[in-house]
Amino acid sequence: MNSKGADIVRHLRLISTATAIGMAAVVNLAAQAPTGTTGAAAAPAATAALVDAQGRPIGEARFQATPNGVLLKLDLKNAAPGVHAMHIHAVGKCDAPGFTSAGSHLSVSGKQHGFLNSSGPHTGDLPNIEVPSSGQLSVEHHVASLKLDSGVNSLLDADGSALVIHAAKDDYATDPAGASGDRIACGLLKK
């Protein structure tokens, strides 16, 4: 074989080797790709469509189970601007206009209201939200004390739960509701 033929053979061997390495990498990546639903995608989830006192939709909350509680993702579209208290209430009912059907704050431990209260907080106490003048807000909160499956601290127990937004901000101390004023929006949690 002349030198030109030998160069062609070496070149073909290099191409074959490179192709084999490339195919092995593709096969390896495909073997590592997830199959089916695992992790967070398979975890229990719930939603709450929030409405104001006039029954107008103002946004949605999504609740995702985590290994250590629940992740709340809130997306508001037409909410009242300002700083507002937000709590999880013990009953899954949202009868307008006052939303009193949602009951009191979720509190399975018998504690008082408020992060700053030495006898608190309620299980359903959440941080205040600040809605800009646009009425649009997206926030996330992790709540370690809650869960979506059955048992103590479940948001989806026999009488359900509701997410409620109040007219004023929560002072995080005053029992039973942090001096947060009227209930101006409510959403029933649904699996």
Image: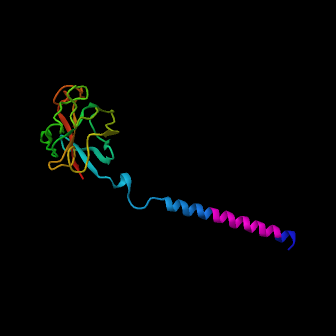
Image x and y of residue 66, in percent: 33, 46
| Nearer to the camera, 112 or 140 | 112
Q: Is 8 contained in the magenta span?
A: yes
Q: Can you give x and y, in whole percent of width and height, for residue 49 in the image? A: 25, 47
Identify whether 132 is placed above or below 6: above
Q: Where 120 sits versus 97, above or below?
A: above
Quadrant of the rendered structure where residue 143 is? top left
Residue at the limit of the structure toward the right, as seen here: 2
For the N terminus, which image quadrant? bottom right
Q: Seen in the image, is 30 located left or right of residue 180? A: right
Q: Residue at x 22, y 46 (%)?
A: 155
Question: Residue at coordinates 22% horizontally, 25% vertically from top-left?
Answer: 118
Front residue of 38 and 104: 38
Inspect the magenta stretch and tell me whether residue 145 lies in it: no
Is most of the magenta stretch helix, strand or loop?
helix
Q: Which residues are magenta?
A: 6-21
Q: Nearer the viewer, residue 167 or 39?
A: 39
Mark yes or no: residue 97 visible.
Answer: no
Residue drawn 16% across the image and 41% down it: 90
Q: Can residue 41 be seen at all in this image of the molecule?
A: yes
Left or right of residue 79: residue 10: right
